[in-house]
Amino acid sequence: MQVELTQPGVLLNPDGNLAQVGWSRQPLLDCNLEQARFYALKPLQRFRLKRWDYYAVFTPRRFFSATIADLGYAGNLFVYTLDFETGELHEEGIVVPLARGVSLPRNSTEGVSAFADDRLQMTFEVLPNERRVKVNWGAFHEGRGIHADIRLQCLPEYESMNIVIPIGRRRFYFNRKINCLPAEGILRYGGVSETLDPHICLGSLDWGCGVWEYRSYWNWASASGFLPDGRTVGLNLGCGFGDLSRADENALILQNRIHKLEGVRFEYTSGDYMKPWRFRDAQGRLDLVFTPFKERVARTNLGIIFSEVHQMFGRYQGKAVTDDGEEVLIHDLIGFAEEHHARW
């Protein structure tokens, strides 16, 4: 049984346990991480808390993504971009010991995420009715440089996929994802400059925090695009870690409204990721085939700290049924699906 949360409150009780478990259409919980109690020695807790602010933008030509993350023991800043026509994919990242200089807001609804040094400047700002993403990385890809100043429309009535679930006894996952945010602004990569038109360009947000088991695994799939009739359509699908008995993050997003799905299965061949993937849910409302055209592999191996992501870019085909019974036909919707293993 999925539990939909409707009442605002805090994320954690004074004893460190989750105050509520479930999902919601709007962010309702205050991220009071100061109440975390998963270690006896409180000063050690900051090294296990993970927080991140991730943006992705789809244009007709390109995928662009930028992330500011605080992993507790380190900050992680990374940007990557994929040209759909040529297949060129490039990614660069910076690791900052103890996350020095990384700033993230308490909640997803306000504030600024930022990092700046002599190599890179990144600022993600929440403004009235929009979110602004600014990146300036002059040395990106051997001096070609990447620069972005993008405004993502985010009206108060837009629904988002919010989830809070336990991981074991004292650990948890708290996440907000917003799909299909109309994007406008400028994106420059090397000698190529794009002016983003909100009628054909869409962005998405992945904002969250949590405390994972040391060995963790998950799947995530996401897409934001348009139907032939001009309506926006998005997907957010996930499984893996945590107790999903009361909530998962599976949803169809149509015209910025959440249509909740349950128990979506990721059917794919681990290790042979270019084979088609299939997604089906427990109620018969979702049946999609995802055909990859590009693989992104991001691997970090620092001994006790390890991460490996296989993120596949491809096209979704199939159908999804809304809460009120409308069958939505999906054709050539570009998005991604991933497998992630971590020791962190």
Image: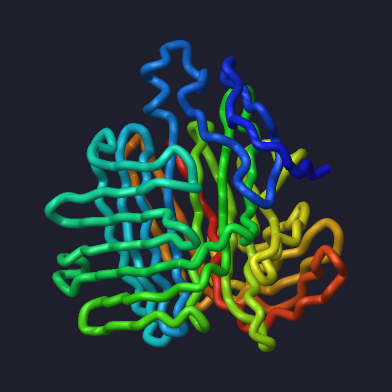
The residue at 26%/84% (across/down) is 192
The residue at 84%/74% (across/down) is 326
| Extreme-top residue of the structure | 40
Residue 147 in the figure: left or right of residue 61: left
Residue 228 in the figure: left or right of residue 179: right
Q: How is the image coloured?
A: rainbow
Name the quadrant containing residue 184. Answer: bottom left
4 above or below 198?
above
Residue 274 position within the rendered picture, expressed as x and y whole percent measured from the top left = 54, 72
Q: How many marks?
A: 0
The residue at 37%/28% (across/down) is 47
- Tell which of 183 and 292 is nearer to you: 183
Residue 13 in the figure: left or right of residue 278: left
Residue 276 position within the rendered picture, expressed as x and y whole percent measured from the top left = 63, 73
- Tell which of 335 and 29 is nearer to you: 29
Q: Quadrant of the C terminus?
A: top left
Name the quadrant containing residue 241. Answer: top right
Q: Quadrant of the N terminus?
A: top right
- Tell which of 320 and 313 is nearer to you: 320
Residue 228 position within the rendered picture, expressed as x and y whole percent measured from the top left = 67, 88
The residue at 43%/40% (across/down) is 51
80 above or below 25?
below
Residue 1 in the figure: left or right of residue 199: right
Residue 84 position within the rendered picture, expressed as x and y whole percent measured from the top left = 43, 82
269 above or below 294?
above
